Image (tube, rainbow, N blue to C red):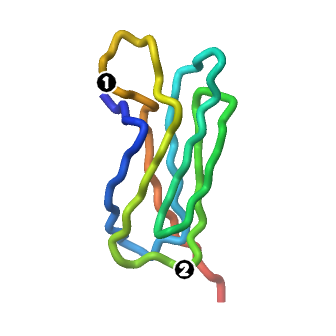
Amino acid sequence: DGWAACHVRFTVRPLTPATSITIRGWRPAQPGSKPAITLAVDGKSVTAAPDAESFEVRLETDQPLTLPFAIAVNCEPALTGYNDDRELAFVLIEVRTETQTIDE
């Protein structure tokens, strides 16, 4: 169903050297709760606190990533009151790796 837990980790094998990673997702508004979404790759992380239900978090890498690497996404707090006993945090819509091209 696309829902992700508060802590998600998976491995990506890039087809071309990755210079940035972007995740897009959706999280329903919850009164009194503003989520903190952290994207971590290869020891580097970025945290966003989106105001809207839809969000996008982008992380630029220090060096192009050519070997398989782990992506970790953390989203706190978990959602409550949605008639589901799973610890859900957000819907993961897209994971995108991008390659910066250098013009010669």
Q: Is residue 95 above or below residue 12?
A: above
Coordinates of residue 18 in the picture (x, y in percent): 48, 71
Amino acid tagged 2: Gln
Q: Furthest-right residue in view? A: 51
Q: Is residue 31 above or below residue 74?
A: above
SS at mark 1 in the image: loop
Question: Measuring 45% from the left and 76% from the top, which residue is drawn there?
Answer: 65
Question: Measuring 32% from the left and 61% from the top, which residue is drawn there?
Answer: 11
Residue denoted by label 2: 63
For marks 1 and 2, give the CA distance.
Answer: 37 Å
Q: Is residue 66 above or below residue 89?
A: below
Coordinates of residue 91 in the picture (x, y in percent): 43, 32
Total labels: the figure holds: 2
Q: Nearer the viewer, residue 16 or 44?
A: 44
Q: Furthest-bottom residue in view? A: 104
Coordinates of residue 32 in the picture (x, y in percent): 66, 18
Q: Nearer the viewer, residue 76 or 41?
A: 76
Q: Quadrant of residue 13?
A: bottom left
